[in-house]
Structures are given as structure tokens and as C-alpha cells.
Image (tube, helix red, strand yellow):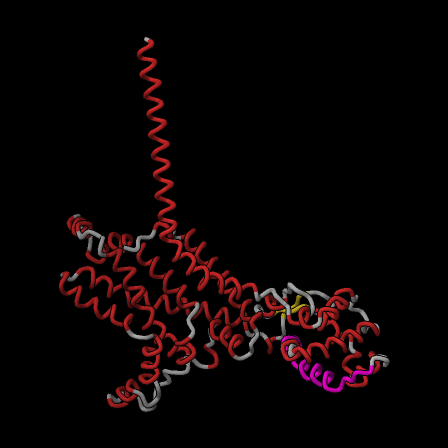
Amino acid sequence: MPASIHATTAGSHASAEGRASYNKAQRRASVRALLLALPLIVFLLSTFIAPIALLLARSAQNHEVPDGMPALARALNAWDGQRVPDEHTFALLASGLKEAQESGQLGTIARRLNFAQPEFRSLLMRTARKLHDDTSKAWKPALIDIDERWDSPEVWRLLKRAAQSPTPDYLLAAVDAQVTPQGTIASMPANASVYREAFARTVSISATVTLLCLVLGYPVAWLLANVPAKTSNRLMLFVIVPFWTSLLVRTTAWYVLLQPGGVINSVLSGLGLATHPVPLIFNRTGVLIGMTHVLLPYMILAIYSVMKSVSPVYMRAAKSLGAHPFTAFVRVYVPQTLPGVGAGCFLVFVLALGYYITPALLGGAGDEMISQLIAIQTNTQLNWGLAGALSAYLVIFTAVFYFLFNRIVGIDRLRFG
């Protein structure tokens, strides 16, 4: 009996030592794998994650006035916003304008305030030019004498809002809303409403392109999956070759083909199918054609990867049981390819949401997608805050679509090959 107890104890000790040794080996393997992946992680963080995070942070930052005129910003934060501020605040405005002009920050401040009111830049620049260094004067009547707009509480309220950070102004402007002088949130006038319509247009174009890619890509994927392997490999080249060509080159090619005097209109006129050039460019038609051509391979490859794994035995079994070929295809074959359809639709739709080059070259004034408006804010208007807000909504919408799609279709269970 003691011998058996000793053997059991020794066995348990050996088992514990074995588990400890196994856990230690697993930890070493995990650390080794992490070290191998560390350069890639650092690269992604520094070149992808960090820039996106900084851009999104701009949507709530409002540092121009607080950094350029900090004393005025503190005074405005304490102002009740009811009547024109007192003499002390006017003096801080005068000194802040002088300091900002000397430091070279006045242009940045003026540009920021011009987003709130188009006339604000001229107001600041004119006031800064006419300021004098006489510190004994009363600044309130002097500034009002330079420009009577300084006697308006509304101008000071706009300046107060620009001196607050973080701010919801950019996030509200990105959905065509604003903060009223009474402090409530209201929609912008219809003639100034741009971004909500752009978001709806972006979703509409992306959904249409996804549907076109599905209609065109499903038969091609079926052909590639059911012809002999040698023929399938040759045909696959036509699907893969576009990936070797620049997106700008492919879009420019459609620009040449679709224009009124281009190849397509020339062929239609030569065949007698059109007496006048068909408008195929600078409209929604051109955008859909160009984006469908670029994104179609993604749909084909996603569906093909699933179709290739579907055994033909199921179709033969359905036919042998008396099912019509069309019925067997719809009720037996198609359900097995739905994971590929779901993956392709998700991939194409998400890629289409952020498209820029193709709509910019082939679309018209009424076909601007949200990515083009983001580019305008960053490259032309230099309004990084509004660009960050638009980008934030685009990221949020993509994330919401992913979770909804995952809930309905179950993208985590989709097979990609």
C-alpha cells in the first residue's frame, strides 16, 4: 500500500513537472512569435494606425485660437456670451492679434474662424493691420471704430466657440448640423447642406456597384470553377491581369473609351445604334462602369474560392432524384456558394465606400463621394478638423456595417478559400 501511494505521488509530481515544462515551452514559442511579428506591428502602428488615429483626433481638436491667443481664450471661456465683453477682453484681443501676427499664427487663426463665418478672416486681418501700439487708449471703442462688427455679440460668440477645445463643431458640420447662438443643435439650411446627401450618395453608389459585381461576377466564377483545370487557369489570367495594372491607368483608359468621341460612341455610331454621342462620362453611368470594372475581380475571386470546394456530387444527386437542372442549381448549388457571395459583397462594398480616383475622373458634379469631399478639405480648404470628422463617420459607418453584416450573414464563418 505505501508503495502504491508513493508511485501515485511520484506520478502526479511527474505530471505536474510535465505540464510546467509544456507551459514554459508554449510561453517561449509565444514570445518568439511575438518578436518575429514585432517589426510588422511597429510598421503598421507607425504608418497606418497612428496616422488614422491622429486624423480622427482632429475631428474634436480646436487648438488654433487657444494656442495662438491663450489669454483671450481663457477670458472668452469665462464670458457669459450675453452682451459684448468688457474692456479687459477687448485689450486681450488687441494684444492677442499683435502676438499672433508677430509669431505668424494669425493666418492660421483667421482660416479657422473663416470656417465658422466666411467674413471672419477679413475682419481679423483688417483689425490687425489697423492696430497701433498705444497702450493708454481704451481698446473697446478703438476696435469698434476699426470695424463695427466687434460691437456684435454674435461675432464674439463665434470667437468663443473657436476658443473651446475639444469641440463638437466639426462633428456636427460633417452631418450638416450646427450649434445655434442659443446653444441648441439645428440643421443647416437646405442650400448649405452637403454632407448628409454625400453620405447617402456614397452608400447608394457602393451598393449599386456591389450588385453589378455580383450579377457579372457570379457566372464568371461558376465558369472558372466548372471548366477543366487547364482552361480555368488560362481564363483566370484575365481576372488577375487587372491587378498588375495601376488603378489610375485603368480609370484613364475608361476616360478615353467613354468620352463623346471615344471608342464606344464611335462603334455605336458606326453600327447605326446612336445618332448622337451617348453620355457615358461625367455622370453616374461612368462612375458605375469604372468602379465595377476595378472591383469585379474581388467578387469573382471570393465566389470562385468557395465554388471550387463545392463537390459536383450534390448536383448529380439532385438530378438523379428528379430535380430539374435549374431547380437543382437554385436549391442545391447556390446555397453552398452563399459564403463566397457574402464575402465578395462585403469586400466590394467596403472598398467602394472609400473610392476616390474613379469617381473624381469619371463622375460629374452630382456624383461626388465622401472620399472626394475629404480630399477637398485636406488639399484645398486645409480644414483638417472637418476632414477628420468626415473620416470618423466613414470609419464608424464601415464598422457598423461590418457588425450588422456579421450578425445577419455571419462573416466570421465565411470561407475565403
Residue 165 vertical position relative to residue 277 in the rendered view, above or below: above
Would you place residue 17 above or below residue 263 in this image? above
Q: Can residue 110 be seen by looking at this rendering?
A: no
Percent of width and height locating residue 105: 65, 77
> Quarter holding the C terminus?
bottom left
- Tally the marks: 0
Q: Main secondary structure of the magenta part?
A: helix
Foreground residue, 121 or 223? 121
Name the one closer to the observer, 105 or 149. 105
Residue at 19% over, 55% down: 324
**Residue 70 point in image, percent of width and height:** 71, 69
The quadrant in which the N terminus is found is: top left
**Picture quadrant where residue 187 is located:** bottom right
Q: State left or right for residue 370 relative to residue 304.
A: right
| Foreground residue among 347 and 208 | 347
Q: Is 321 contained in the magenta span? A: no
Q: In front here: 6 or 248? A: 6
The answer to whether residue 68 is visible is yes
Location of residue 167 by image quarter: bottom right
Side of 60 where 48 appears, left or right:
left
Residue 131 highlighted magenta (yes or no): yes
Residue 185 placed where, x, y %? 66, 65
- Asked if residue 330 lies left or right of residue 226, the reply is right
Task: Give the residue at x 43% y 51%.
Answer: 407
Horizontal side, residue 299 vs residue 222: left or right: right
Magenta residues?
110-134
Instruction: Tell me which corner region of the image, top left, top right, bottom left or bottom right, holds residue 138.
Output: bottom right
